[in-house]
Image (cartoon, rainbow, N blue to C red):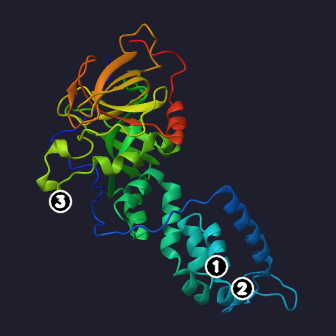
């Protein structure tokens, strides 16, 4: 089968380093920028109230009308900035919207909107490139305006994990590591898989954004290198080559992700299964049995026994090598189910 063709050469950079080719510099993360449906409804309601009352400010005619005594946009701008910021955020779905709403509407509005410009640019970035946003936010990104431009131009390269690689059966229910940049003309991501072998790149349409993710949040700190700089760390000390240590959160019967790779010099991919049994050993490790339900029960690939919990990479009865085991959160499990094959996988 083709179960382990993914990986990375020894010359690849550690994966916790996103690579802005032209846009470089330190960054620091602002807050979370996704709106809930409730927040969107609130903003839309306020926007519908404000629009017919905009009137005239700084000589700019917004085409609105308001009754005598009703507050106009000037009142909102000067006295109700939180409401102005919510309306600006709601109206700024794209850079063009932002320019029209915030930059060109009037000098007063433009000046006030500068206070929330970083948050607005982050929101627009996250809406367009969610996986890139997760990667760059982990790096401490702050200048989302510059990152938006470098991503749109294809200069920003992020290392992510791709579900359902090339949509081949050999990579069913797996997330494989690749370096990606965005191709605006194709509205797609160019994915160059990290491998000890030469492998073909893949174009992932933006409509399949759900196939991309950054390193799972619960694994990030555990997979960071203990060395101060990448130059001090050997390849096995850094993600995605580092073995995930620990047994925390593992529950029999629940979904798990197993680190597995076919080639020694390749990075680990994540392979989805269910924990059938777990027996803790005296040395702090555990003997785990993982089943892979996308294979028939009679398949040699259906059940695997592994030792996990320490930093050791071990040979696998399937072939290749195993690393650590991590529990799958509810939201992650729901995402995995989007890729579950309609028919059992048979090689």
As drawn, 210 above or below 289: below
Q: Which residue is mark 3?
A: 228
Q: Secondary structure at mark 3?
A: loop
Q: Relative to 58, is 178 on the left or the right?
A: left
Q: Nearer the viewer, mark 3 or mark 2?
A: 3
Q: Can you give x and y, in whole percent of width and height, for residue 137 in the image?
A: 40, 60
Q: Is residue 314 left or right of residue 48?
A: left
| Mark closer to the observer (1, 3) | 3
Observer-nearest residue: 259 or 262? Answer: 259
Q: Viewed as shown, does residue 206 lie left or right of 219?
A: right
Q: Is residue 153 visible?
A: no
Direction from residue 90 to residue 238 in the image, left or right: left
Residue 316 falls in image quadrant: top left
Asked if disc 3 and disc 2 are in contact, CB closer than 8 Å, the reply is no
Residue at which label 1 appears? 82
Question: What distance separates the C-alpha of mark 3 from that of mark 2?
Answer: 52 Å
Element type at mark 1: helix
Q: Residue 58: x and y, percent?
A: 66, 92
- Find the residue positioned furthest to the front: 282
Q: 234 or 126: which is nearer to us?
A: 234
Residue 73: give its label.
2
Distance (Cα) linking label 1 and label 3: 42 Å
């Amino acid at each position: 089968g083709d179960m382990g063709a993914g990986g990375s050469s020894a010359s690849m950079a550690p994966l916790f380093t996103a690579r802005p080719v032209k846009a470089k510099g330190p960054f620091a993360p602002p807050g979370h920028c996704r709106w809930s449906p409730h927040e969107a409804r609130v903003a839309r309601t306020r926007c519908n109230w404000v629009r017919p009352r905009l009137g005239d400010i700084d000589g700019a005619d917004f085409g609105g009308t308001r009754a005598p005594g009703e507050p106009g946009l000037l009142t909102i701008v000067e006295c109700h900035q939180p409401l102005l910021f919510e309306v600006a955020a709601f109206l700024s779905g794209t850079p063009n919207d932002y320019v029209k709403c915030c930059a060109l509407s009037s000098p007063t509005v433009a000046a006030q909107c500068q206070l929330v410009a970083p948050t607005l640019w982050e929101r627009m970035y996250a809406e367009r490139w969610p996986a890139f946003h997760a990667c760059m936010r982990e790096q401490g990104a702050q200048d989302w305006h510059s990152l938006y431009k470098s991503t749109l131009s294809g200069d920003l390269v992020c290392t992510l994990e791709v579900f359902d690689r090339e949509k081949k059966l050999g990579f069913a229910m797996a997330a494989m590591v690749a370096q990606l940049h965005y191709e605006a003309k194709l509205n797609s991501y160019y994915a160059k898989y990290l491998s000890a072998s030469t492998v073909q790149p893949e174009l992932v349409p933006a409509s399949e954004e759900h196939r991309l993710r950054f390193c799972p949040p619960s694994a990030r700190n555990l997979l960071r290198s203990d060395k101060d700089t990448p130059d001090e760390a050997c390849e096995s000390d850094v993600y995605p080559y580092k073995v995930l240590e620990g047994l925390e959160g593992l529950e029999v019967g629940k979904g798990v992700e197993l680190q597995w790779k076919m080639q020694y010099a390749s990075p680990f991919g994540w392979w989805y299964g269910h924990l059938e049994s777990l027996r803790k050993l005296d040395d702090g490790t555990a003997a785990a049995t993982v089943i892979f339900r996308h294979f028939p029960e009679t398949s040699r690939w259906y059940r695997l026994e592994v030792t996990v919990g320490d930093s050791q990479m071990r040979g696998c009865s399937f072939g290749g090598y195993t690393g650590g085991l991590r529990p799958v959160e509810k939201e992650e499990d729901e995402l995995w189910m989007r890729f579950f094959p309609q028919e059992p996988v048979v090689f």
